Amino acid sequence: MDDIDLRVSERLRALRGERGITLSVLAEQTGISAPHLSRLEKGERQPSIGTLLQLARVYGVSVSQLVEERAEDDLHIVRAGDAPTHQGQDGRYTVLSGARATISVVRVELSPGKPTRVAEHVGEEWLHVESGTVRFTVDDRKETLEAGDSVQFDSARPHKLSAANRRSATVLIASTAATVPMRHPVPR
């Protein structure tokens, strides 16, 4: 397990402990099974981008706060050569938004032949293809997106991505999932 995986698992455990909730309650709030949540907290599994967005939304924190412990600042600058990149279930990803951002921005490098997990989370999402060709599926609709193409959609609809043409692809994903209030938020 690398440092980022350890920090994420520790942060997830700490957040649940701070709120005094059980895995069962968290599973009900997120739609993620209690055994899977337990494995995430133990560092036995890496969370997908969709899972990170869902957990951030439920806890009322940004994805940056789940992934990295950074001192909060009024200005969040990510220099091209300094952006920390992590290997996750859905490919290599870099969190570009700051800890107090009202929108989560992530750059994902998709490996050829390996689709992301299906994600469904409250909020809105915007996706922009930086390079390569991407197969985008929402509900049962399939679209092919080329470099420079963008799509915006209700992220509560089941969606997934994959790199097309046996070549990797890079996408920017901006999501409001972490900032949309729940009907029954997990208490602080």
Image (spheres, rainbow, N blue to C red):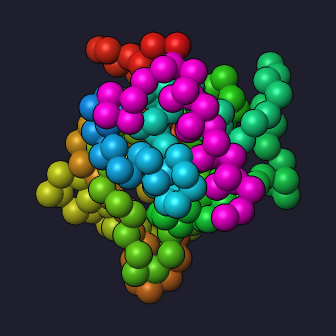
Q: Position of residue 59 (x, y in %)?
A: 49, 25
The answer to whether residue 102 is visible is no
Residue 120: in magenta span: no
Q: Position of residue 149 (x, y in %)?
A: 44, 56
Q: Residue furthest left?
A: 140
Q: Relative to 136, is 133 on the left or the right?
A: right
The answer to whether residue 7 is visible is yes
Q: Who's the residue at 61% across and 31% down the image?
A: 14
Q: Who's the residue at 32% across and 28% down the image?
A: 25
Q: Who's the residue at 18% across and 51% down the image?
A: 139
> Compared with residue 173, is residue 88 higher up or lower down, i.e. above or below?
below
Residue 16: in magenta span: yes
Camera-side residue: 93 or 48? 48
Q: Position of residue 94 (x, y in %)?
A: 65, 53
Which quadrant holds residue 120?
A: top left
The segment highlighted magenta reads: 1-25
> Compared with residue 56, is residue 39 higher up or lower down, i.e. above or below?
below
Q: Who's the residue at 32% across and 14% down the image?
A: 184
Task: Label the magenta part by its dominant secondary structure.
Answer: helix
Q: Tell me the quadrant of the picture where the N terminus can be found.
A: bottom right
How many marks do you count on the picture?
0
Q: Position of residue 21 (x, y in %)?
A: 42, 24
Q: Relative to 150, is 83 on the left or the right?
A: right
